[in-house]
Image: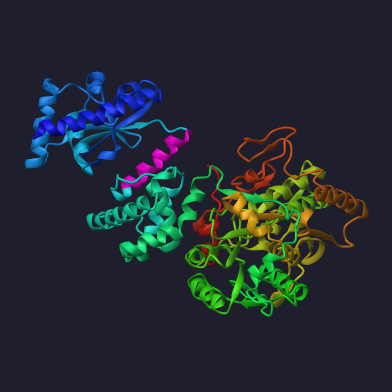
């Protein structure tokens, strides 16, 4: 019996050998000794006796047996050899009682190299077994900035917590994200591993049946994206048919992961060409107004952020009064997002604007289920194909505000009161600091966070002898005060100087126009990836208003710079920029890339303060920061 199996295995080996030669690849098993001769090993770790996924067993430890096998571990030696006879005997043993003796192997970078037991691996691979028992020693490379090494260190942490070694990731951060999605961040027990492996098996079958092997991502990547939409417990409860159908619905989330730069930034509205056919796309009948829903986490009376968007909603409704109506839902907490979305969609909402990043995650499932509804979330740096995000380049106005602050700070000390340490906010702080040093090279920006536990603005200003303050961007209607924008604070009195302005009405108007013109849809098809709209002064969605308290000369300078920013002649992030830790973050005579600005996790060297960690923030701030928070570069 074993001789027939060997003949078939030999055919597979020779076929693989020829294929490798024709492609210019090494046709034999990779040798760990050769690989390690070029790498630096930090230490070794005894992993003990474990089940090893055979797909991850890729080579041999030393040169001794490598020429007996093709690169797929199938034999290539003739049938009459001693090697072939031993292989046949192992084949018979596998058929009759199963191979039980463990092999000995090294694990390096999540791949296994056989020290003893190459023929056992070959036989089990021929019979398409899933795993093999092995005594494993892990060889750990020295940590470096190499992305593969970083991925491996993330995998080791994942493996330590879960005990799972049959899933891998090709994108940084996904291993940690998967653990959080499953909801068990301490060491898993055997029941937890069995439950997860069962889910992994069913998901892999559905994913690969639908063509997942064609995508250049791992099953671990895809599973993480899927659970981000549907949730772990909900996925466990799915039948095989439901799982397969939902994999299809979720396909664009997998495709986004294949992009090197998974987020497409749209920096300006661009030309809007009228396409009459789109009107019927938005409005099934000409007598029906299309509906736009706004979801607010608070009310306009209690939040300056919501108030700004509410002004934008009112402007939008007035501008398109004959074509649309708006729905406004206040106090949409994270646990109500799915319910509210279903409700506004049942009311006929064609477009939904969510004005808080924490609404993103619970919206994904609804977005996948209702691709006919356009859902946009007000946040930055979010790689989801089904939900587009939008934000405004407030850092341009902050740069100008900093220019004015630097000119007016007599003691060179300026306070910046920020709220949430999320994407976009760090760029605002740094742009303000660069603006201040533009007019006052001695200026120092004292950073404080209004969402930090124990925050006391007056005590902070008094302790640091600060009189020029950059604070929240707009008033809060129910709790109106003069402490917004840039102001001078002295002897308990506030003198307003400058107010950065969010023109959300202009933004929403242009976004609706782009939908009516057809560019919204065509842009998505052309980009083929997640889209973030990030418009600024050139689009009219950001502005700066100076009060009469700003000296005429300083105002003239700010107005001149504002005109140059609108035309694109100058940008806030230009030339040599140094961070607090002494690193050069941008080179001389170069503009900083938009992606770099968006993803900032460091502060410029003129800032005194830091990016707060999660545990230092008040409870109300943590849901926002958990979704789009920035951790300071270590």
* Relative height, residue 416 to residue 345 (above, below): above
Report x, y in % for residue 332.
Answer: 55, 74
Instruction: Indicate left or right for 106 with 499 as reference.
Output: left
Q: Is residue 337 magenta?
A: no
User: Residue sitting at 72 percent across and 48 percent down?
Assistant: 431
Q: Nearer the viewer, residue 393 or 600?
A: 393
Quadrant of image for the N terminus: top left
* Relative height, residue 131 to residue 252 (above, below): above
Q: Nearer the viewer, residue 82 or 294?
A: 82
Q: Is residue 72 visible?
A: yes
Report x, y in % for residue 40.
Answer: 39, 25
Report x, y in % for residue 614.
Answer: 51, 57
* Relative height, residue 376 to residue 266 (above, below): below
Q: Is residue 148 magenta?
A: yes
Give the overall secondary structure of the magenta segment.
helix
Specify start and end residues of the magenta stretch as a single range: 145-160
Q: Is residue 100 visible?
A: no
Q: Quadrant of residue 326?
A: bottom right
User: Residue sitting at 49 percent across and 58 percent down?
Assistant: 615
Question: How many numbered marks are there?
Answer: 0
Q: How is the image coloured?
A: rainbow
Report x, y in % for residue 148.
Answer: 43, 35
- Residue lying farthest left? 96
- Residue lying farthest right? 552
User: Residue sitting at 88 percent across and 49 percent down?
Assistant: 560
Instruction: Indicate left or right for 476 with 239 as reference.
Output: right
* Relative height, residue 83 to residue 530 (above, below): above
Instruction: Indicate left or right for 71 with 621 as reference.
Output: left
């Amino acid at each position: 019996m074993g001789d027939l199996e060997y003949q078939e295995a030999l055919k597979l080996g020779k076929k693989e050998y020829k294929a490798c030669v024709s492609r210019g690849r090494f046709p034999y098993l990779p040798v760990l000794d050769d690989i390690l001769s070029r790498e630096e090993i930090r230490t070794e770790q005894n992993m003990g006796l474990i089940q090893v996924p055979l797909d991850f067993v890729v080579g041999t430890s030393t040169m001794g047996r490598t020429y007996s096998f093709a690169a797929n571990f199938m034999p290539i030696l003739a049938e009459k050899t001693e090697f072939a006879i031993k292989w046949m005997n192992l084949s018979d043993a596998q058929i009759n009682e199963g191979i039980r003796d463990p092999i000995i192997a090294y694990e390096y970078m999540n791949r296994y190299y056989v020290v003893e037991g190459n023929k056992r691996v070959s036989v089990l691979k021929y019979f398409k077994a899933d795993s093999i028992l092995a005594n494993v020693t892990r060889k750990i490379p020295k940590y470096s900035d190499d992305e593969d090494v970083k991925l491996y260190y993330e995998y080791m942490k994942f493996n330590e917590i879960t005990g799972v070694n049959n899933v891998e990731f090709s994108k940084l951060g996904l291993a940690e994200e998967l653990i959080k999605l499953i909801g068990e961040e301490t060491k898993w027990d055997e029941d937890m591993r069995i439950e997860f492996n069962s889910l992994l098996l069913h998901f892999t079958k559905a994913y690969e049946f639908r063509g997942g092997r064609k995508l250049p991502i791992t099953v671990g990547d895809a599973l993480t994206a899927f659970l981000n939409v549907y949730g772990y417990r909900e996925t466990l409860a799915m039948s095989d048919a439901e799982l397969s159908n939902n994999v299809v619905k979720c396909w664009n989330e997998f495709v986004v992961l294949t992009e090197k730069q998974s987020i497409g930034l749209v920096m300006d509205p661009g030309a809007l060409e009228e396409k009459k056919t789109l009107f019927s796309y938005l409005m099934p009948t000409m007598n029906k107004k299309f509906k736009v829903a706004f979801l607010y986490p608070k009310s306009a009376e209690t939040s300056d952020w919501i108030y700004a968007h509410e002004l934008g909603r009112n402007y939008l409704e007035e501008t398109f009064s004959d074509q649309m109506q708006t729905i406004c839902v206040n106090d949409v907490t994270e646990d109500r997002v799915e319910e509210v979305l279903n409700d506004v969609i049942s009311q006929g909402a064609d477009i939904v604007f969510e004005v808080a990043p924490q609404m993103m995650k619970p919206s994904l499932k609804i977005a996948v289920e209702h691709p006919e509804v356009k859902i946009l979330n007000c946040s930055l740096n979010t790689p989801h194909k089904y939900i587009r995000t939008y934000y405004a380049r407030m850092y341009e106005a902050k740069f100008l505000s900093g220019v004015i602050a630097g000119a007016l700070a007599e003691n060179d000390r300026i306070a910046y009161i920020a709220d949430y340490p999320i994407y976009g906010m760090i760029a605002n702080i740094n742009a303000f600091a660069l603006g201040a040093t533009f007019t006052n090279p001695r200026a120092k920006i004292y950073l404080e966070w209004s969402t930090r536990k124990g925050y006391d603005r007056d005590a902070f200003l008094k302790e640091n002898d600060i009189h020029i303050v950059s604070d929240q961007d707009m008033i809060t209607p129910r709790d109106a005060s003069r402490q917004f924008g840039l102001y001078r604070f002295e002897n308990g009195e506030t003198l307003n100087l400058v107010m950065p302005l969010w023109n959300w009405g202009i933004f929403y108007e242009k976004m609706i126009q782009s939908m009516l013109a057809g560019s919204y849809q065509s842009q998505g098809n052309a980009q083929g990836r997640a889209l973030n709209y990030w418009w600024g002064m050139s689009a009219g969605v950001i502005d700066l208003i100076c009060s009469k308290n700003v000296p005429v000369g300083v105002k003239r300078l700010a107005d001149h710079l504002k005109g140059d920013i609108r035309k694109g002649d100058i940008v806030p992030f230009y030339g040599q920029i140094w961070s607090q830790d002494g690193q050069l973050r941008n080179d001389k005579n170069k503009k900083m890339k938009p992606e770099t600005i968006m993803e900032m996790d460091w502060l410029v060297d003129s800032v005194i303060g830091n990016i707060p960690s999660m545990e230092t923030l008040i409870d109300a701030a943590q849901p926002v920061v958990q979704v789009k928070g920035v951790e300071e570069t270590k």
